[in-house]
Amino acid sequence: MHAVNVRQLKSNPSVALRAAKNGPVIVMNRDTPDALLIGMEQLGIADLPHVRSALAVSLFRGGDISVATAAKIAQVSLADMLSLLSGMGIPLYGGSADDVAEEMETGAQWLAPQN
């Protein structure tokens, strides 16, 4: 097990992330354990791609990340993430119906041929 303090984590997070691939990393805050970093592969989950997708969907649904970030977390293309979310009935846009109509009108104007 590896330990880092908050200052070390802020100044060079890659050291802690590399160590987390080999085992748990304890993050110390004023000499008190405050957090635990565990590499995804260290979890020993046989179906890691589905776990990544579930995590990405959950974070997107909660409004914590964008769809592009969700695709990166799930390690899929943006098109595949959009298909997954829409297939699950998860709205891709958080605005009101009026906001969506306005965005669609703006998009149509941008795409209209210029004369």
Image: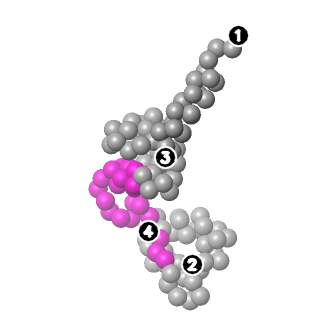
Mark found first going from the N terminus, 2 or 1: 2
Q: Identify whether 63 is placed above or below 104.
A: below
The residue mark sitting in front, 2 or 1, is: 1
The way the protein has been coloured in the rendering is one colour
Asked if residue 76 shows in the view, the reply is no
Residue type beneath disc 3: Gly
Q: Say left or right for 85 vs 112.
A: left
Q: Element under label 1?
A: loop
**Mark 2 sits on what residue?**
4
Residue type beneath disc 2: Val
Q: Element under label 2?
A: strand
Residue extending furthest top?
115
Task: Decide whether the magenta segment is chiefly helix, strand or loop.
Answer: helix
Give coordinates of residue 29: x percent, y percent.
57, 83
Residue drawn at (60%, 67%), measured in percent from left and top? 13
Asked if residue 8 shows in the view, the reply is yes
**Mark 3 sits on what residue?**
94
**Mark 4 sits on what residue?**
38
Residue type beneath disc 1: Asn
Residue drawn at (50%, 56%), measured in percent from left and top? 64
**Mark 1 sits on what residue?**
115
What stretch of residues is rendered in magenta? 35-59
Distance from disc 2 to disc 1, alpha carbons, whole Å, reads 62 Å
Residue type beneath disc 4: Ile
Residue 70 included in the magenta stretch of the image: no
Mark found first going from the N terminus, 4 or 1: 4
Residue drawn at (47%, 39%), measured in percent from left and top? 97
